[in-house]
Amino acid sequence: MQALPGFRDFYPLECSKRHFIFKTWRAVATRYGFTEFDGPPLEPLELYTKKSGAEIIGQLYHFKDKGDREVSLRPEMTPTFARMVAARHKDFKKPMKWFAIPQLFRYERQQKGRLREHFQFNADIVGASLPGEDAEIIALAADILREFNLTSADFQVRLSSREVWRDILTANGIPEEKHADVFGVIDKIERVAPGESEKKLLALALEPATATRILDASEIRSADALPMSHGVERLTQTLASLSAMGLGEYVTLDLRIVRGLAYYSGTVFEIFAKNSQGEPTGRAIAGGGRYDNLLLNLAGVDLPAAGFGMGDVVLGDLLEEKNLYPQNVDGPEKIFVARLSAAQETAALELVSELRRAGWAVEYSFRLAGFNKQFEQARNCGAAWAIVCDDKIQQGLLEVKDLRTRSQETVAKNALTDYLKSKKQG
Amino acid sequence: MQALPGFRDFYPLECSKRHFIFKTWRAVATRYGFTEFDGPPLEPLELYTKKSGAEIIGQLYHFKDKGDREVSLRPEMTPTFARMVAARHKDFKKPMKWFAIPQLFRYERQQKGRLREHFQFNADIVGASLPGEDAEIIALAADILREFNLTSADFQVRLSSREVWRDILTANGIPEEKHADVFGVIDKIERVAPGESEKKLLALALEPATATRILDASEIRSADALPMSHGVERLTQTLASLSAMGLGEYVTLDLRIVRGLAYYSGTVFEIFAKNSQGEPTGRAIAGGGRYDNLLLNLAGVDLPAAGFGMGDVVLGDLLEEKNLYPQNVDGPEKIFVARLSAAQETAALELVSELRRAGWAVEYSFRLAGFNKQFEQARNCGAAWAIVCDDKIQQGLLEVKDLRTRSQETVAKNALTDYLKSKKQG
């Protein structure tokens, strides 16, 4: 019997890599003053259809529970976040800076970097819709990647704005009810063959000249190339803040980015790994933006917000490729306690307990095996030290063997932890 | 819109309490040499029905996925553990000591201490079926509770044995095919009215005298009251090991414990909080035992194993009741960076980034607000320090205010982190 297709088993090595990612996410988010929350992995189906429309159902793990409720495994965290914020926002000072590391579930065709479940770091600010908030969100995403020792040669933040895009579409006479469809075409511009996007725009009944101007606009890479407007002013301020935070070299204006989801209202961004030519490549490592109307539409509370998500699969593949997982993800230095005969059984167990309560990771053989057998077990479990309880334990003395250097010393039991501390590596 | 009934929202305070529990579980398990693993929260339904029979379906969140597979949210971790061990046991040295902290799901009537989801610490040893392994599992459970500052006045480990019980039933002429039903009656002995258990045993077609002897046996609290046998010898050795590990005062032999699940084969135990009379009370905090045949029956691999589970709900209620959550579960000391005018905007953001990269948790106002407004925000976010960027920043000087003592000093920017470190509390 196997795990379901698209679901991962985390054996100890994979689990320790996952921990390394989670630990880094938590550490940087905490430095940025974000606080962790979580919600249920199973929610009312309506929470998702209300936000994304019925078409999302095709991607959901949804069913009817035994109480006849339509329920779904969570495909994303934002609806839960919106629900929780709406219910208790009065209990929290603004800006609220929250993060979560939910496991998310989508039934979709399997492909590299996209399973049917993944873990996703989510960070959101509920505040006042300021450029500084946008910069804070983007800086957090970039600094997380820096914390993994990824550099500006490894990744690129591509910054854009729905507000700027709305101005462009309106200036080109495209009515608002068509904006979502046009965004849908721009969002896929890099994933389709040349010429395909133009065809799709023409299929939306755009004039050929208009379609060309829209595609030309997606090539814009500098705020100077845009007529000044509220949206452009905002982008410029966001970029200035990011530069002040030392992140200028990571961020590029790139109007090909609009994000797929309907609810983004202003600043949007995606982060991509760079290939050897310095071009964005593969699936996005992270993405997000401002969604000032979602809390109102979904939960009836008028609070502007911005946030992003960063999944563990694309990131994990990149860390693997760049060899950025730490060498020793195995945990602390271990001690193995050996005993030579049944006479030392009790003393050995006492010592095991004592050392564990003093904070050491300790193992011993559950069976009174021969000396060599016990040492083999010590090496198997990766112990750095073997402490041997023999007859001398009656005089309060222990043999302490450093399994890395193979050196050995006799140490008084009551001086043991001091001795080990003085010899501890790393 | 609300969370589903029986599902919890973890707002920041609840999330930090959950973290405190998880952190303690991980720390003690690591000291015991256990390694973390995890599996999917969604598994083939067959994984559960194969082990527990079709009757478990009534408690499951199960459904048919879009690929027409019968699937279920995991109601327990042991089947996933067995599946994963069976698939790759040859890659790992024995004994394997693994733990996990899965979220588990059961559709059942809601009541105190039992929701429809909970997190459960699971630790298992795949080894050689030795009393020392049983002792290791029990010691880990007890030491976790001690780590939460619970004492022998707060909880009791109730130790029993299916092996001993099988001997008792056989000696009383009860055929093996009835054992599971009799265990079912004993398992509920404390939860039904007096006389009820006898009625249930008689309903299993036991002679009245036999039923009385079985109920009398459940009153046994000492190995001396049992005829010597392999099972009793084993219990005695387990108790001796636990005593050597300094845990004697926590453990009581108690034959009322048999555990509800069918697959336990030897030593079983449950841990309960004690009431003011020192009697076990409420729902079990933890429970487990030896299941030497499960891996063979479920996955075709003949490996003896023992393990236990400890949920976060009953434990969390106890920590709350005993006031054992740490006072400050809020994270590290925070710094708030304030600036007096737009002229210091860039310098302030530089300082924020610098401090964050040095490992400090730093907040600032996204809007250039007045001095008082910024200090209010500093207090709201729980900052210990406010660093004020004013005109003096051009000379490399900062005002550093301790928000707890209200003392204030001018500090050179390049001496700032040393200054803060020297003043850091705790």
Image: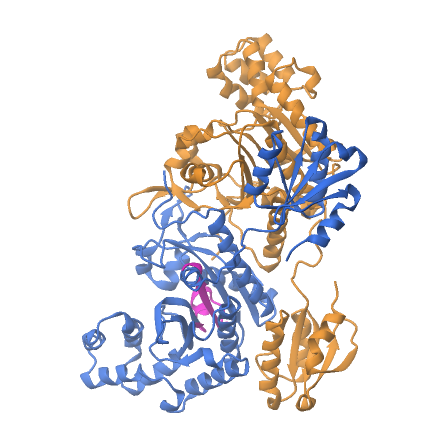
Chain colours: A blue, B orange
Residue B175 visible within the image:
yes
- Residue A288 picture location, percent across and down: 43, 70
- Residue A9 picture location, percent across and down: 43, 47
The residue drawn where x is 45% and y is 75% is A152
Q: Which residues are magenta?
A: A289-313
- Residue A140 picture location, percent across and down: 52, 71
Foreground pick, B294 / B302: B302
Foreground pick, A212 / A190: A190
For this orientation, the residue located farthest to the right is A395
Residue B194 visible within the image:
no
B44 lies left or right of B262: left
Vertical relation: B397 (above or below) A258: below
Foreground pick, B258 / A270: A270
> Does the segment drawn in magenta span residue A300?
yes
A330 lies left or right of A226: right
B253 lies left or right of A262: right
Vertical relation: A122 (above or below) B48: below
The residue drawn where x is 66% and y is 58% is B329
Vertical relation: A388 (above or below) B424: above
The residue drawn where x is 70% and y is 53% is A423
Foreground pick, B315 / A66: B315
- Residue B57 picture location, percent across and down: 41, 35
Vertical relation: A167 (above or below) B317: below
